[in-house]
Image: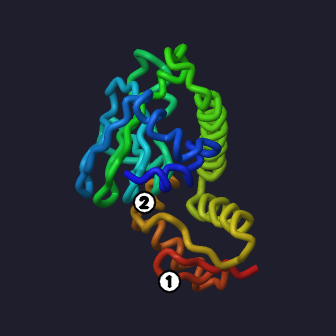
Amino acid sequence: MKNSLLSNTALFRGVHQKETDSLLSCLQAYEKSYEKNQVILHAGDMVDSLGMVLEGTVLIEADDIWGNRSILDKAECGQIFAETYALLPGEPLMVNVTAACCCRILFLNVRKLTQTCSASCPFHHKMIGNLLSLSAEKNLKLSRRIFHTSSKSIRGRLISYFSQQVRQNGSYQFTIPFNRKQLADYLGVDRSALSNELSKMQKEGILSYEKNTFRMIP
């Protein structure tokens, strides 16, 4: 791993590169690689470390007892996952974390941040503040998903999600981070029904699209 990569992530914001080695040692850091579709963490697992994506992309997924899958979120290079569970001893994971492609993950025992450090590391408080900010952002993303899936219709869910993308990108044209199957899972709808609705919306002149790039037509 390269310290320069870590220093550019939100979790390590404000931590100098010369401090990174000491911090990684303090947090018992280790790396592990995964193949595409390999499960990184299983629902029901107990964890004491968060994961940071160094290469690739991971999906945060929830499965019901009938095997229906819903994508709750995704984490790309420099982003973290499982931080909430890592800070709550004895709390089992409610989700699966799966490699969307070949991935390299850095694991950090963040519970060490909540304990008195024998070395009195001055950079602990920086990472705690960063972790709080990231947790707040995750809560906001979850709230957005709940808002997007509140409509009873597929079109309503698509319009809600696409409207948020327009605001976020400041443009009526944008590229989403999901393929069709992932978008359907994220919005909690059937893939074929979603594709049919997108086709109808394009024919009606509401939007146009090419793969995962869309343009809303106001």
Per the image, the residue denoted by label 2 is 182
Residue 95, picture quadrant:
top left
Q: Which mark is residue 210?
A: 1
Residue 133 quadrant = top right
Residue that appears at 60% across and 32% down: 123
Q: Position of residue 156 (x, y in %)?
A: 64, 60
Q: Is residue 99 above or below residue 159?
A: above
In the picture, measured across the screen, residue 30 lies left or right of residue 109, that is: left
Q: Which mark is residue 165?
A: none
Pick the front one: 162 or 127 = 127
Can see residue 14? yes
Q: At label 2, which amino acid type do we have?
A: Gln
Q: Residues within 10 Å of mark 2 (few under 14, many from 20)?
A: some
Q: CA distance from mark 1 to mark 2?
A: 16 Å
Q: Does 60 appear above or below 184?
A: above
Q: Quadrant of the C terminus?
A: bottom right
x and y, in percent, of residue 25 in the image: 40, 31
Q: Secondary structure at mark 1?
A: strand
Q: Report the front residue among 139 and 20.
A: 20
The outermost residue toward the front is 18
State the residue in front, 87 or 93: 87
Looking at numbered disc 1 in the image, what kind of residue is underneath it?
Glu
Task: Identify the residue at horizontal 66%, vertical 85% (top origin).
Answer: 205
- Residue 203 in the image, given as x and y percentages of width and height: 58, 85
Of the residues under marks 1 and 2, which one precedes in the sequence?
A: 2
Residue 213 image-quadrant placement: bottom right
Please give the name of the residue rendered at 43% of the width and 36% of the height, measured from the top-left corner. 24
Q: Tell me if residue 188 can be seen.
A: no
- Crowding near the residue tagged with mark 1, few <14, some 14–19, many ≥20 C-alpha atoms within 10 Å: few
Image position of 204 with respect to 114: above or below: below
